[in-house]
Image: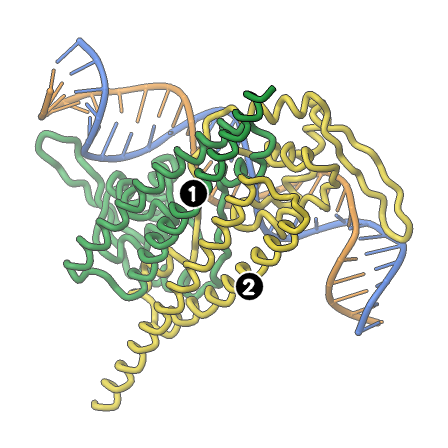
Chain colours: A green, B yellow, C blue, D orange
Amino acid sequence: LNTQDVILGLLHMRSYSGYEMKHYFEEVFSFFFDASYGTIYPTLSKMEQLGYITKENISQENRPNKNVYSLTSAGKEQFQIYLNSPVEAPTVRSDFLVRMFFGEFAENELAIKWVQDALLENIRLAENLEKMKHTRKEDKLMSPTRLICLQIGIESKRTQIEVLREGLLSLQKLNISDMEQGDQQ
Amino acid sequence: LNTQDVILGLLHMRSYSGYEMKHYFEEVFSFFFDASYGTIYPTLSKMEQLGYITKENISQENRPNKNVYSLTSAGKEQFQIYLNSPVEAPTVRSDFLVRMFFGEFAENELAIKWVQDALLENIRLAENLEKMKHTRKEDKLMSPTRLICLQIGIESKRTQIEVLREGLLSLQKLNISDMEQGDQQ
DNA sequence: CCGTTCATGTAAGGCGTTACATGATTCC
DNA sequence: GGAATCATGTAACGCCTTACATGAACGG
């Protein structure tokens, strides 16, 4: 899986400019994919040269021109090649979970801060996903597999929020018993 | 967060060879970090040159020598610098979820296969994590934050398994109604 | 007037993976 | 006899990020 495959998928739904793709990734794909402009724009040039997509320059009033890309039949074929390739294992890299794993080597207050921040961030993300699900479901734009994708995002976030809430309490109790120990000395 | 930071963390627990580190990553870190030999060995050389770790060549009977690395005080300090740096957002790249998102452009049977495989893989991973939790908990080797880390892994997997099971059923129903439609023609 | 949004791109550099190379031992 | 495990390392290459560059319009 690389950025090219994802762009081919996106353009199966409708035409997008590079700028719009980036926004789509941020809003919708946040929990399973991301790409920066530094990847998107060069990839679009390459894909145009390969004949997978065509560019159309659109003039706009009061804002810059944009390059809107559309899928060609070669692009559709290329996407089917991707879909028929073996599924790759996911890659995850979570700074937060590494810190949790090695938390015993950090000060308790630092760890508490990490968990609090993670909690807030996860609540924010869960709310966004929830909104997406409702707006899109009413539009009847959601395929069964896309619903699975979204549902995994939502439920995973919910689960993490629960664990983090419990974890936060246990860390805060530790802090209190440390303070009592300190008082007794 | 990079491989160096994680190695510094690992060596806070005990000494490891590069080969052992890779195994540790596979067994324990699988749901939030990974690194290949091609990263580990060069990183260890670099860290030794920087004075964060020291190498000791250990002779073994009936198997190759190994280089076991230990943390220096400079390495401990470096790890504290990492712990006090801002927490980075996690990066995820899930081929499976991309395929779920664009599943409407694939054949239903292909999608069913993807979900079935994901289900089996997630069950396997959940069982491994569960085992880890019990063996380590009895040893009383588990810090509160490490328990949070493990618990997030376990509960996330469980949640995903549930969603995948439901999703699989809905996709299989679709397949049946397609076949009935086909029969009627 | 200043920050944000819209919009596209490049260049340098970082970080990482895959594949290759080597070789003994152990288990089936 | 062949595959798997133990064990370390390099080299080529791919992919991606960050920072830089540019510039108009709009809202406060």
Q: Position of residue B76 (x, y in %)?
A: 66, 25
Q: From the viewer's perspective, tell me whether residue B51 is left or right of residue A115.
A: right
Which element is circle 1 on? Answer: helix
Q: Position of residue B98 (x, y in %)?
A: 37, 55
Q: Amino acid at mark 1?
A: Leu
Q: Quadrant of residue B164?
A: bottom left
Q: Give the residue at x 69% y 35%.
A: B11
In this rendered view, identify the residue nearer to me: B125 or A112. A112
Q: Are marks 1 and 2 in contact (CB under 8 Å)?
A: no
In this rendered view, identify the residue nearer to me: A82 or A162. A162
Q: Which residue is mark 2?
A: B124
| Chain letter of disc 1 in the image | A
In the picture as drawn, the residue positioned furthest to the bottom comes out as B184
Distance from disc 1 to disc 2, alpha carbons, whole Å, reads: 24 Å
In this rendered view, identify the residue nearer to me: C10 or B176. B176
Q: Give the residue at x 35% y 47%.
A: A49
Q: Position of residue D6 (x, y in %)?
A: 79, 52
Q: Position of residue B116 (x, y in %)?
A: 45, 70
On residue B146, which mark appears? none
Q: Amino acid at mark 2?
A: Arg
Q: Which residue is mark 1?
A: A164
Mark 1 and mark 2, same subunit?
no
Task: Tell which tag, 1 or 2, sits nearer the viewer.
Answer: 1
